[in-house]
Amino acid sequence: MRVFAKYIATIATVITVLSTSGVVMAQSASNKTVPAGNAQLHLSYAPLVRGAAPAVVNIYTAKTVSVRRFAPLFNDPFFQQFFGRQLKRSVPGPKKKVQNSLGSGVIVSSDGTIVTNHHVIEGAEEIKVVLSDRREFEAVIVGTDERTDLAVLKIKSPDNDFSFLELNNSDKLEVGDLVLAIGNPFGVGQTVTSGIVSALARTRVGVSDLGSFIQTDAAINPGNSGGALIGMDGKLVGINTAIFSKSGGSMGIGFAIPSNMVSSVVSAIQTGGRAVRPWFGASGQAVSADIASSIGFERPMGVMISNVFDGGPAKRAGIRRGDVILNMDGHEVQNPQDLRFRIATLSPGGSVDILIWRDGRKKKILLPLESPPEIPPKNETILKGRNPVAGVLAANLSPALADELGLSMSNINGVIILKIVKKSNAANFGFAPGDIFKEINGQSVSSVSGLLRILKTPSKLWRITIDRGGREMSMAIKS
């Protein structure tokens, strides 16, 4: 026991000497440190908050919705059978109601440009922003990008000196870095919470197909959506967008869109009114443990290419089936979602370096960054006539439309259903937006014009095959 006590005393002496002499106890290669003594433990985030808070706004939206005055039972056909037309005459129609919602946003330039989540302002007819000093302004939508759940707003004001947050390079973040979340949770007013970066490149969040999210344990609650996630330099590293919760409140698992994606979307919307991402022209699957073992990898990593589109950038760059994408623009690629994210943060024009694995060796390839072409043209057409698909708004698939809709490379040709008219034949027979026509009455469907020719021939029995979410479905419908 005496020896143990002497050992503890020695340790305490060493710690005291180190702390009083100003020696940093732990230091990484990037000069990030843990507190070296009691004085550092009393440091405050207040200076960071004072600098960042004026650039974080509360967003209030309003939109008109239709609400039924009576229970849904009155719409039941079985119930109506007993009361007939008298019920329809006595039941009033839908009532118009103004629905309000709230969220947060971040001013990213002195002219009052704001970034927020698409779902915060979706369908909004009026948008009001409230600054931290309680000034209120109307705002207009500059553009939105549903695939990344981002939207760009502009404050309606002649002022050009709004406080704003600079965007940092989110690729420099490391797990364990300290971060602050600023927003308007539950509408209580601007609130600041602290935490760390719990994980990076989270792709299975379910918010968007282009997501590679920052995970943090800083408390994020409803109303925080669109708010700021800042680093210890006071710059923006992410836009808070989602939480994992079983109760509706924070459980220490929140997700933010990385600032590099934010920067790409804002730049694209300000330049062309919408986000246009480069077209890769290939698709693949994550390298599993079995695949890694078969090709000589020490661990699973990268994306193995399984499909290359003829005439696309990947094909012209020399990428083949069986190649494994290891790295893009200096960043490791772990899975297809990671690959899509990396491509989405780039802008059309120029090229990007890709590191691949082929025939047991690493090889560098230069991929041209090009906008996806709309070939063939959409040719949007509403289908009519005495057939099961009457009421469908159909369009020709192209790389541009497939990219816009977030479809995989396997579904880049054919005719897709964009919308369906309510109470139409197509709606009654269960067709849905996103369905892709493959075959009708034994004839392949490759274009809208070809589909119209097929539908001109009357038929007593329609045999239709569609692709729904990657699965083929066939049906036989009597006319």
Image (tube, helix red, strand yellow):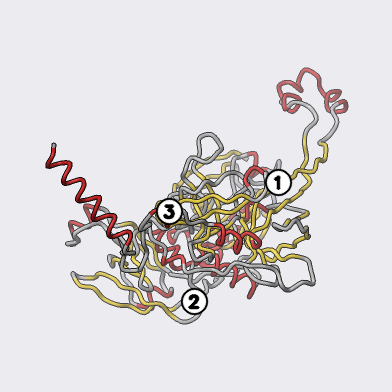
Question: Dot 3 lies on which element?
Answer: helix
Read off the residue under disc 1: 101
Measure the C-alpha gap from mark 1 to mark 3.
39 Å
Measure the C-alpha gap from mark 1 to mark 2.
38 Å
Packing grade of label 2 (10 A; few <14, some 14-19, many >=20) is some
Label annotation for residue 41:
3
Question: Dot 1 lies on which element?
Answer: strand
Question: Dot 2 lies on which element?
Answer: loop
**Residue sitting nearer the eye, 450 or 245:** 245
Between discs 1 and 3, the one toward the N terminus:
3
Q: Position of residue 40 (x, y in %)?
A: 42, 57
Q: Residue at x 48, y 56 (%)?
A: 43
Q: Relative to 375, say whether 153 is above or below.
A: above
Left of 60 or right of it: where is 15?
Answer: left
Location of residue 31 by image quarter: bottom left
From the image, state whether disc 2 or disc 3 is nearer to you.
Answer: 3
Left of 150 or right of it: where is 10?
Answer: left
Read off the residue under disc 2: 370
Between discs 2 and 3, the one toward the N terminus:
3
**Image quarter in which the C terminus is found:** top right
**Residue sitting nearer the eye, 245 or 17:** 17
